[in-house]
Amino acid sequence: MYAAPFVAGSGRGVLAAVLSGEPVSWIPVGEAGLWAFTVLATAGLLKIAATSLSIGSGGSGGVFAPGLLGGALLGLSFYALIQEVAQAPLPAAAYAYLGMSAFFAAAAKVPLATSIMVAEMGNNYLLIPPSLLASIVAREVSGNTSIYSSQLLHRPPREIVDAEALLAILREKGVEPPITAGQLADGGIKPVRHDTPAESVLKLMEKGAPVVPVVDGDGRPIGVITPDSLEEAIEEGVDLSTTPAHTLAYMEAPVVGEDEGVDDMLEKMLTYESEAAIVVDRDGRYKGTVLIEEVIAALAYILQEAGSGSRRRRTPERA
């Protein structure tokens, strides 16, 4: 990161310099040879990896400019290789523009729009035919998954982010939430045994159960059934009347001990990207389920009480 700070940022400044042919730190813009190819290709792949990690984490440091920069660097690396082997038919900037077009069309699945955009950026409409060709090929060989749909799929549920924000505010105020997972556990969400027909799970969900925990013969959780997993089973033609619940149960929610703090529980919920947590007692048996809405309500109440307490403590000083 210290040697290539643009890897961690949007890269807009570096992109502008690359397209104008200006020297950028140690990046050999417009140079030829194996060394230039290696450096440019490595820089492009590092930028792509950093952007992928950012999106995969649920956040984003941007998609558009980082994607264009990664494509431009790969295009320049191709120019460096071609120029070393034979005389490149086009200037280096043209390869940068074509790399941008191909890479972003593959990532966003918009070859026509990308080709026109690149021509506008380069102020040269002669770039449209080669850009369109490169974009269509890149689009076809890269599959159907868009970087934008992936960003949404990997984004944690908004409620978990809200709960983490409340927890961060409490910590800034020096207030550690004095609540445990066991105190929040809702015993109203009853589990089903592993050999219970999945048809019974469907009836529970029709009555409003957000998730249905599945336990073994000793009452220890082996997983949960979510509405999505049950709907998928129905679409696949699974006979719910004869299918035992454990065959549809997956560990899609974290299992936490009743004595664990709400902060540890939230961290596990974020890891699982789950809006529910299964709470067990000291013997590992099912105790209850905590929903993210209950966590938010508890943290909001504690925050309100902390604010009221601080105002009451300051009142005598003002008097």
Image (tube, grey):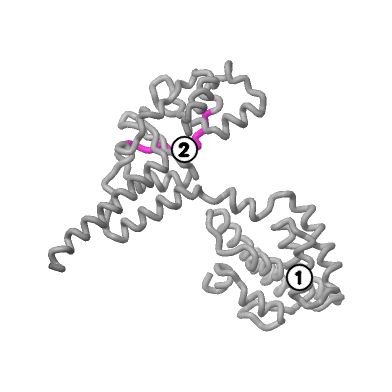
Is mark 2 in CB contact (under 8 Å) with mark 1?
no
Residue, far bottom: 22
Residue, far top: 242
Which residue is located at x 55 percent, y 25 percent? Answer: 247
Above or below: residue 204 compared with residue 76: above
For the C terminus, the quadrant is bottom left
Above or below: residue 131 compared with residue 297: below
Looking at the rendering, which quadrant does residue 131 occupy? bottom right
Above or below: residue 122 compared with residue 159: below
Decide: few, some or many residues near mark 2? Use Cα within 10 Å; few <14, some 14-19, many ≥20.
many
Name the chief secondary structure element in magenta.
loop
Identify the residue under disc 1. Answer: 118
Label 2 residue SS: loop
Q: Earlier in the sequence, mark 2 or mark 1?
A: 1
Q: Would residue 223 be visible to someone looking at this image?
A: no
Stretch in magenta: 249-258
Q: Would residue 147 be visible to someone looking at this image?
A: yes
* In front: label 2 or label 1: 1
Taking the image as shown, residue 215 lies to the left or right of residue 114, namely left
Identify the residue under disc 2. Answer: 253
Taking the image as shown, residue 48 lies to the left or right of residue 273, namely right
Residue 8, horizontal then vertical, whole percent: 55, 67
Q: Label 1 sits on what residue type?
A: Val
Residue 91, horizontal then vertical, whole percent: 81, 78
Which residue is located at x 79 percent, y 61 percent? Answer: 112
Residue 114, horizontal then vertical, whole percent: 75, 64
Q: Which mark is residue 306?
A: none
